[in-house]
Structures are given as C-alpha cells and as structure tokens.
Amino acid sequence: MAEGKPARKTTRGEVRRVEQLTPHMIRVVLGGDGLAGFGAGEFTDHYVKLLFPPPGVSYPVPFDLEAIKRDLPHDQWPTTRTYTVRAWDPEAGELTLDFVYHGDNGLAGPWAARVRPGDEIHFFGPGGAYTPDPQAGWHLLVGDESALPAIAASLERLPAGVRAHVFLEVAGPQEEQPLDSPGDAEIVWLHRGEAPVGEVLVAAVRELDFPEGPLHAFVHGEAGFVKELRRHLRTERGIPLSQLSISGYWRLGRDDEAWRSSKKEWNRQIEEEEAAALPG
C-alpha cells in the first residue's frame, strides 16, 4: 500500500436469509451490526465488491484486508466479485443481493447456493452512478440476468405513469420474476434458448418504434451485445451519451479479473469507433 494512502474500508455482512428465486437465481439477504452506517439508495445500480477467500483459507478476526495482504502470500488473498444491490432496507439493516447460479461453475454462484444463515462475508462499497431521470420523457431498460437486479430496482423508482420499454433476456420462461413499477412499464421477457447471449435483445431494441420525447436508457450485461446496442443507439439512433447508462457487466469467455483488466481498453476502442462514425 502506498505511503499515506488510507486503507479501503470493508463492511461485514451476516447472512440472514437465502431464497431460490428461480432455477438459476438465488437471493441472499445480509444483515448484522457490521452494516451499521452502510449507505445505499441514491442509485438504482448500486453495487458492492464481495471478498471471497480461497478454499480452505480463513482469516483472523476482525477481518483486516491490509494485514492479509501484508502477511499472507498472494494466493491466499480474497478474490473480488462485483454484485448489484437489489435492495437496501436501512430500517431493517438488510442488504439484498441476487446471484446467477449455474451449478459449480464460477465463484459467487456456488457460494450463494451453499451459504447458510449466520455465515459472514466482507465487501467494499457501495458504488453506483445511475438512477432513472425523473425529467425523461420515457425510459429504455435492457439487460440479461446480470442486469436484472439493477433493472428491477430501477423499475421500482420510475416516476408514476412515465413510460418505459423493458427488455429482459433470460434462459427460458422458468427464469422470469414478478416485477413491479409505478411507471407505465411494458416489460418484455425474451427467452434465449440456444441463441447467443444478447442476440434477441439486440433484435428487440432494433425493432422498437421509439416514442417521442427525451430518452433515458440503461443497457447492461454481456459486453458483446452491449457494444452492438451502444453502436446502434449512438450512431444509428443518435442518442447522446449523456442520456445513456451503458456498459458491459461481464464478457463471454473471460473471468471477472480478466474482464476488469481489459475493460478500459475495450471502452477506449468503442469511443474511437464512435468518434469516427458520428458526424462532426
């Protein structure tokens, strides 16, 4: 750690409840006194960075990440995974996170499947940047399973009666969830089946007859389809970047660390392509 640089604060959460929402979505609710002072709610895409110890590794109590990195070899440091805050209840002191689960593949999904009330996890955050603009004429919300928690939270914060077109891609009908909104939201569930991730989302947005009025859009999920939709919205529809929250949450064929390390360069390439394609 650089001299004079303050240590990043971690928060401790204690598992209170675990719920299987769908065959491939697990909800974990965290609570406990470690969440005292936790702040979220300004944004609907709030996220936390969960810290998972390697198998068989346990850390001294209280958890001290600075000491862990100072005293333990690198292969015993925790691994970070980023997850959207589905809900934060400050009165109950409960933080809700939803995990996509595909059996033993991955890190966070298997953790959510085996975790039990009383277990603990530490995390950074929250971060975040997006919430539906109350001044927008209409909203466009697009995403795969990874973006579903943020889109569900955003739907709950839409202004009453304001129009929204929502496209959600999941594996099949068994992965649909009940969603509520005070807005005038047309929610379309798209079933991927054997198609590539995001293919049906791109087609749905391309075919949409955009309403009149200023748009505020949230488009997140697998990086490949996000790139296609960003090109469509920016260069074909002429939507200003200021009216878009659009980014790849993950990238097919890469783990979280590899995607994070390459994301800056990936974004730079997209910006260069847009600059060449846009007039002026």
Image (tube, grey):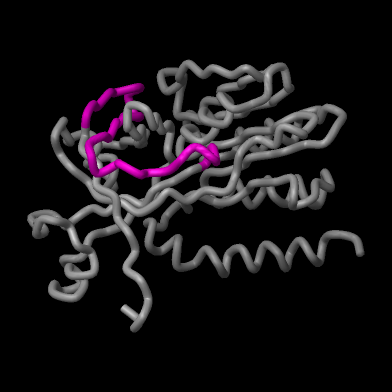
Whether residue 131 is in magenta: the answer is no
Q: Nearer the viewer, residue 38 or 53?
A: 38
Residue 89: which quarter of the image? top left
Residue drawn 72% across and 17% down?
161
- Is residue 18 placed above or below 270 in the rendered structure? above
Please indicate, yes or no, whether residue 196 appears anywhere in the rendered image. Answer: no
Q: Is residue 253 above or below residue 29?
A: below
Q: Could you say where residue 218 lies in the image, as x and y percent from the top left?
A: 63, 40
Q: Residue drawn 64% across and 46% down?
A: 245
**Residue at 47%, 51% in the rendered image:** 127
- Span of residues in magenta: 16-45
Location of residue 164 in the rendering, given as x and y in whole percent from the top left corner: 70, 25
128 relative to 240 in the view: left or right: left
Hey, which residue is sitting farthest right in the picture? Answer: 280
The answer to whether 142 appears left or right of 76 in the picture is right
Q: Residue at x 54, y 51 (%)?
A: 248
- Residue 266 in sight in this render: yes
Q: Quadrant of residue 202?
A: top right
Q: Quadrant of the C terminus?
A: bottom right
